[in-house]
Amino acid sequence: AQTVTQSQPEMSVQEAETVTLSCTYDTSESDYYLFWYKQPPSRQMILVIRQEAYKQQNATENRFSVNFQKAAKSFSLKISDSQLGDAAMYFCAYIIPNAGKSTFGDGTTLTVKP
Amino acid sequence: DVKVTQSSRYLVKRTGEKVFLECVQDMDHENMFWYRQDPGLGLRLIYFSYDVKMKEKGDIPEGYSVSREKKERFSLILESASTNQTSMYLCASSWWDRKRYGYTFGSGTRLTVV
């Protein structure tokens, strides 16, 4: 069975600083997607960034980037120039498209200090 | 943008009641999902559907059933609600286009069973 581990239940960062959230996963599959989702108090799950396993290049979306290490099964999220609006719970997810297989981590609560 | 709409944001039901949670997506997506979110447990897949009238059990289907009579609507049914089904329920739909894969969530229904 696939597992996703987020080892940091809580993290905090000073506004404008950089923070990295860790995620490791375990799978025997070769074709899958990895996601980071953000869930603010409004509860809406918002896609932050997506990485296709077959791509070696790390995904980036503005201030958000990932460090994808496929052999190590690691998928960390780096948030640069942190903003107050980044405060939320962040979930790492492993999904196999069209197979109904999805595994989410337990989440990391990020606090941004002004 | 894809919109996934959950009909109720908050629900309070009594033990033993039959409960329907409704989810509608507006982008003709094939796959739809129901998740349960509990603190410290991440998101756990209850059921998913890959087409009209087609469904598959997820990781925690016990006590739940689903219905998908139309492509845009996916209903989660609690046949006889129990207090341990008090939780946040999230609906999602996904699309697959060549190598790009998307996963969009509704805003959640917080169900309390008393």
Image (cartoon, coloured by chain):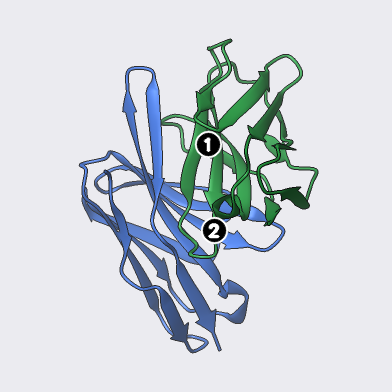
Chain colours: A green, B blue
Quarter residue A1 falls in: top right
| Image x and y of residue A16, in percent | 66, 42
| Image x and y of residue B114, in percent | 56, 89
Residue behind mark 1: A101
Q: Residues within 10 Å of mark 1 (few under 14, many from 20)?
A: some
Q: Is residue A10 left or right of residue B35?
A: right
Viewer can see residue A113 = yes
Residue behind mark 2: A40
Quarter residue A37 falls in: top right
| Residue A27 sits above or below residue B77 on the image | above
Please state the total of marks drawn on the protein image.
2
Type of amino acid under label 1? Lys
Viewer can see residue A1 = no
Looking at the image, which is closer to me, A82 or A21? A82
Residue B66, label in figure: none
Q: Tell me the chain of label 2.
A: A
| Residue A61 sits above or below residue A9 on the image | above
> Residue at 46% across / 85% down in the picture?
B12
Q: Is residue B19 left or right of residue B39?
A: left
Circle 2/circle 1 CB separation < 8 Å? no
